[in-house]
Image: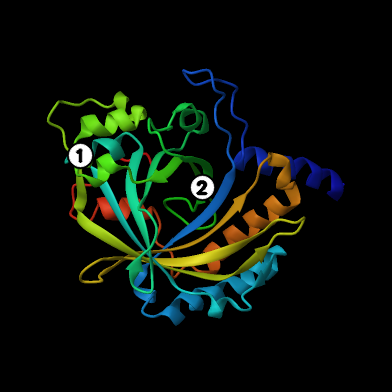
Amino acid sequence: MANKTKTKTQPALRARHLPEIKPGKYSDGMPLDEIRYLECKLILKPNHFTSRQSLFDFAKVMRRPAKQAGVRFDPSGYDLEPLQIREVLFVDTHDYRLYNNAFILRRRIPYKDGFPVGEPEIVFKYRHPDLQTAAEMDVRPHITSDYRIKFKAEALPLKDGLGGLRMLYSHNVEFNQTPAMAAGERLSLDTMVQMLPALDTLKRSHNDKLDLVNGTIVEEVLQDVGELDFGNNVRTVSNVALWRSRGDHSPLIGEFAFQLKFRRRSDITDEALARGEAFFLALQQEARDWIRLGATKTGVVYRLKGNPPNAHE
């Protein structure tokens, strides 16, 4: 009898977290993108994070929930992994027209030994609680350089309590900053619409500009803290991050996250998915004093100076 219950329950887990996308095509005939990532996030209060060691302190909180869920957590050697620093900024209209319509546009630059490395990365995403709506939004840019699509299912705690989860679906495209953006034309919404045709759905006038959201440049401090092994060859590295404002280093928000990447749904078994959910729910209870409910990192930046937007998050 127990085996029958298990067989019925596990497929339901996969259907809930990684539901099927109804077949369809974009305007050029290409099939809709499929989800290739499952990311679990806990948004954390920033006051706990005062040093590099404090990022590893959260790893200690993970041990008991991992054991309870049958997940192997191995922090060995991660104290030798370097701390990662990235600069993150968001741009939008003065009335948050992108964010209010479920779009996010940000630039990210990694630093090494105190200096920027590589080309600035642009991330454009459409994030929505309805999977089909997210899938049908064609986020592909109109550029001559390479780009990469990342379609993610993102699991977060419920907005109003611990012990559950809600899903957001983030349809992303990543590419290097173009010469037009570097030259300052990025401030024109019309120019951005030419580059990102998905934004053509927004109401706009000729003089609309894109500016730095709340005048804030974020410094992201990120540390890999250990490997999570869910069994059935499903494993990933977990990390803890702190966002703080560049300049005065005022802490904004923290985050714990782990991400599973797959080519096909069958790559993540029902058993591994069930362990992942059990771990995520148990960790919420264990880390209850750390967690900030009803928030996302992006949302915190948008709400820094009041007048909160009407986001889909």
Q: Are marks 2 and 1 in contact (CB under 8 Å)?
A: no
Say left or right for 228 vs 255.
right
Say left or right for 200 vs 148.
left
Between residue 124 and residue 186, name the one nearer to us: 186
Residue drawn at 44 percent across, 70 percent down = 289
40 is higher (above) or lower (below) than 201? below
Residue drawn at 25 percent across, 66 percent down = 246
Say left or right for 45 vs 284.
left
Residue 154, numbered label: 2
| Pointer 2 or 1: first along the chain | 2
Query: Residue 224, image x and y in percent?
Result: 52, 69
Label 2 SS: strand
Q: Quadrant of the C terminus?
A: top left
User: CA gap, disc 2 to disc 1?
Assistant: 32 Å
236 is higher (above) or lower (below) than 172? below
Name which residue type carries label 1.
Glu
Between residue 300 and residue 246, name the one nearer to us: 246
Circle 2 Cα neighbour tier, 10 Å, few/some/many (<14 / 14–19 / ≥20): many
Label 1 SS: helix
Residue drawn at 58 percent across, 38 percent down = 35
97 is higher (above) or lower (below) than 226? above
259 is higher (above) or lower (below) than 94? below
Between residue 1 and residue 132, name the one nearer to us: 132
Residue drawn at 75 percent across, 56 percent down = 233
Residue 185, numbered label: 1
Name which residue type carries label 2.
Glu
Query: Residue 11, image x and y in percent?
Result: 73, 40
